[in-house]
Image (tube, grey):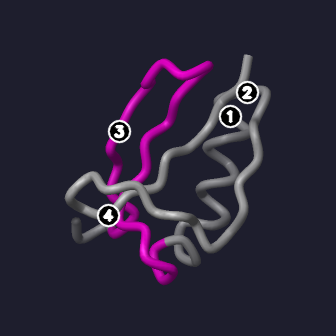
C-alpha cells in the first residue's frame, strides 16, 4: 500500500510542492509528515492537499490554512 498527497491551489489545480514528499506505508506516517510540513507547503504555493491510498482518494481537499 502506498499513501500519497496531492498538492493543489484552491481551485484544484495541481502544484509542485516545495518540500519533496515520499510515498508512505501508513496513513499515520502520511498525516505526520503533512503535520510537520504544512506551513512550508502553504508558503510555497499549495493551498490544499488530498490524501490517496494506491490512487484511491481517502479525503480532501483539506485546506492547509486554518482560515480556509
Cα distance in 3D space between marks 4 and 1 = 24 Å
Query: How many residues crowd around disc 1 within 10 Å: few (fewer than 14), some, or many (20 or more)?
Result: few
In the rendered image, which quarter contains the N terminus?
top right
Q: Position of residue 8 (x, y in %)?
A: 38, 57
Closer to the observer: label 2 or label 4?
Answer: 4
Q: Secondary structure at mark 1?
A: helix
**Does the stretch in magenta take in 49?**
yes
Determine contact: label 3, label 4, CB under 8 Å: no
Determine contact: label 3, label 2, CB under 8 Å: no
Q: Secondary structure at mark 3?
A: strand
Determine contact: label 2, label 1, CB under 8 Å: yes
**Residue numbers of the magenta segment:** 42-65
Q: Quadrant of residue 27?
A: top right
Q: Is residue 37 above or below residue 44?
A: above
Q: Secondary structure at mark 2?
A: loop
Q: Is residue 47 above or below residue 31?
A: below
Mark nearer the N terminus (2 vs 4): 4
Query: How many residues crowd around disc 2 within 10 Å: few (fewer than 14), some, or many (20 or more)?
Result: few
Cα distance in 3D space between marks 3 and 4 = 13 Å
Q: Quadrant of residue 10?
A: bottom left
**Does the stretch in magenta take in 50?**
yes
Q: Which residue is mark 1?
A: 28
Q: Position of residue 39 (x, y in %)?
A: 53, 75
Q: Which residue is mark 2?
A: 26
Q: Is residue 18 above or below residue 52?
A: below
Q: Is residue 25 above or below residue 21?
A: above
Q: Which residue is mark 3?
A: 60
Residue found 22% across the figure and 65% down from its top: 68
**Of residues 36 and 55, which is closer to you in this image?**
55
Closer to the observer: label 4 or label 1?
Answer: 4
Amino acid at each position: 500500500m502506498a499513501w500519497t498527497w496531492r498538492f493543489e491551489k484552491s481551485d484544484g489545480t495541481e502544484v509542485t510542492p516545495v518540500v519533496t514528499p515520499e510515498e508512505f506505508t501508513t496513513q499515520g506516517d502520511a498525516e505526520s509528515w503533512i503535520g510537520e510540513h504544512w506551513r512550508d507547503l502553504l508558503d510555497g504555493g499549495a493551498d490544499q492537499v488530498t490524501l490517496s491510498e494506491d490512487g484511491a482518494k481517502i479525503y480532501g481537499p483539506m485546506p492547509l490554512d486554518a482560515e480556509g
